[in-house]
Image: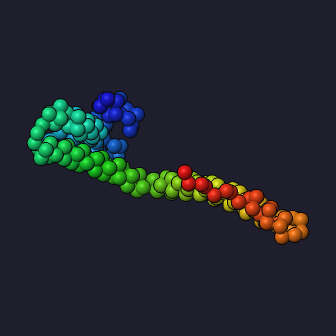
Amino acid sequence: MAGSLSGMFSGQPPGPPPPPPGLPGQASLLQAAPGAPRPSNSTLVDELESSFEACFASLVSQDYVNGTDQEEIRTGVDQCIQKFLDIARQTECFFLQKRLQLSVQKPDQVIKEDVSELRSELQRKDALVQKHLTKLRHWQQVLEDINVQHKKPAEIPQGSLAYLEQASANIPAPLKPT
């Protein structure tokens, strides 16, 4: 699976990506940084994947299931999660830097993306408004139907006894205790 993710972002075959164009000699942040404790051909994506697998493995490890020292188990899991979070932050920084480079090199592209996001947000909100208007119309109709039903008592035959019989027919019978 590590090989399938390493070329995922650039459409390149698995392996370390070449340096970005226009920046000769600068190592890509997805490649191992100098002085970092990474294997020679490891990328941040590979490390992120392996640290995630280590987190998952530490949670289902038979050693931890059979272990009796809860503090040792907690420490091991915490270390795995912290490593995963650190690598995730590094990966996020890489993409933020690439985004910054894009905004400097092609500011019109960033504006196009912003306009596109705003249009999609407007469409989503318009759909939400339409949904609420539909519900509003439904409840207005329900209220109107209730008002029409309350105006019908004028059509009831005259006389207090007939009115009481009609009104009591709509009242449910009380529950009898058993």
Colour pattern of the rendering: rainbow
Q: Is residue 40 visible?
A: no
Horizontal side of 111 relative to 147 (left or right) equals left
Relative to residue 72, is residue 144 depicted above or below?
A: below
Q: Is residue 41 visible?
A: yes
Horizontal side of 158 relative to 106 (left or right) equals right
Q: Name the residue at 17% across, 39% down.
A: 38
Q: Residue 166: which quarter of the image?
A: bottom right
Place of residue 142 in the rendered image (x, y in percent of width and height, measured from the top left): 73, 59
Q: Name the residue at 64% across, 55% down.
A: 131
Q: Name the residue at 61% across, 55% down.
A: 175
Q: Name the residue at 13% across, 44% down.
A: 70
Compare residues 3 and 166 and report the one nearer the observer.
Answer: 166
Horizontal side of 162 relative to 50 (left or right) equals right
Place of residue 65 in the rendered image (x, y in percent of width and height, measured from the top left): 18, 35
Place of residue 2 in the rendered image (x, y in percent of width and height, measured from the top left): 29, 31
Horizontal side of 42 relative to 128 (left or right) equals left
Q: Residue 169: which quarter of the image?
A: bottom right
Q: Residue 115: which quarter of the image?
A: bottom right
Q: Residue furthest front?
A: 178
Relative to residue 46, is residue 107 depicted above or below?
A: below
Place of residue 150 in the rendered image (x, y in percent of width and height, measured from the top left): 79, 66
Relative to residue 153, is residue 98 depicted above or below?
A: above
Compare residues 21 and 108 and report the one nearer the observer.
Answer: 108
